[in-house]
Image (cartoon, rainbow, N blue to C red):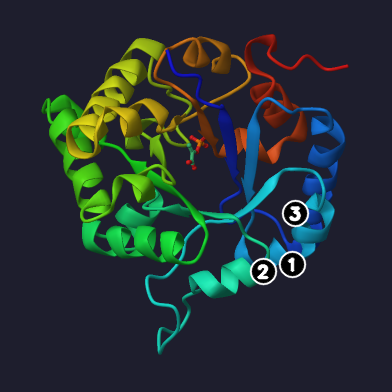
Amino acid sequence: MVARRPLVAGNWKMYGTASEAAALARALKERLAGVESVDVVVAPPYTALHAVRPVLQHTGIVLAAQNVHWAAKGAFTGEIAAPMLQEAGCGAAIVGHSERRQLFGETDDTVRGRVRACLDHGLMPILCVGETLAERDASRTLDVVRGQLDAALDGLTPEQVLRVVLAYEPVWAIGTGRTATPAQAEEIHAFLRARIGTSFGAPVSHHSRILYGGSVKPDNIDDLMAQPDIDGALVGGASLKAEDFDRIVRFRGLTPRP
Ligand code: PEP
């Protein structure tokens, strides 16, 4: 059995001005002091990165962006490049979130470019994959997530894949209050891990962290984290409430509140 260090990431989406985000970060800093056994990541909106960065200094909480462009610079109005994020204090970036894929035309090709940009510029990519409800109902879940995974990791070395954090986020569970059951999530996590093993070797698959995302809340995190292939969570709505996010980070009583 490989012990993978748990990781809980909060995706703040398009919520929070810079001052609101800094206040949330301060609340998290206070609540999460002393948590050492879980990696914690927060992804505020771009405009709040500069305000959140100093709050998180020396806390161990990693600052992340919600997306990143594939080019290091260029005529791409409205986009943000990896070196800019790195200088802004980011250590990670979410890539391929379903809201980007569904609402903003993100494709497997652009997702692959964004993963590479992260790896080339010292950012940890949090790579999201997941099926829609129609795809699940048509029994296409495994094909869909395998296709997204293969496309995003195509051409990477095993060492690079080890730096990727994968997030399985069924689209039908995001922001809907409808969570995958622990068994449903575990089935896909085990499948994705096996696929990484086939493509990049067993040691990589054993060490790769796979997060679950989709209406994760304080009352379902413990059962999700009891699954052998679930290594953490990517949390949207509940990450905006310090108390809820704190409880999620302290899943299964791993790090009780003092
Ligand atoms: C997400 O945005 O990645 C997410 C999982 O959102 P929620 O937790 O609100 O479903």
In this rendering, the answer to whether 88 lies above or below 74 is above
**Can you identify the residue that label 1 sits on?**
50
Residue 106 shows up from this direction: no
**Residue 38: image location, x then y, percent:** 65, 28
| Whether label 2 touches label 1, CB < 8 Å | yes
Position of the C terminus, as image quadrant, is: top right
Q: Mark 3 sits on what residue?
A: 21
Camera-side residue: 165 or 49?
Answer: 165
Q: Is residue 181 among what the camera can see?
A: yes
Mark toward the viewer: 2 or 1: 2
Give the Cα separation between the discs numbered 3 and 1.
10 Å
Categorize mark 3 by other alpha carbons within 10 Å: few (<14), some (14-19), many (20+).
many
- Residue at 63%, 43% (x, y): give it: 41
Label 3 or label 1, whichever lies nearer to me, is: 1
Q: Amino acid at mark 1?
A: His
**Callout 3 amino acid:** Ala
- Tell me which label, 3 or 1, sits earlier in the chain: 3
- Residue at the image position 81 percent from the left and 53 percent from the top: 57
Tell me if mark 1 has few (under 14), some (14-19) or many (20+) residues whose alpha carbon lies within 10 angstroms of its own.
some
- Label 3 and label 2: CA atoms lie apart by 15 Å
For label 2, the residue is 88
SS class, disc 1: helix
Determine the residue positioned at 69% across, 63% down: 49
Distance between mark 2 and mark 1 Cα atoms = 6 Å
Above or below, 173 against 91 in this view is above
Tag 3, which secondary structure?
A: helix
Q: Is residue 167 left or right of residue 254?
A: left
Residue 183 location (% of width, % of height): 34, 11
Q: Where is residue 45 shown, x and y percent of the image?
A: 62, 60
Name the image quarter holding residue 256: top right
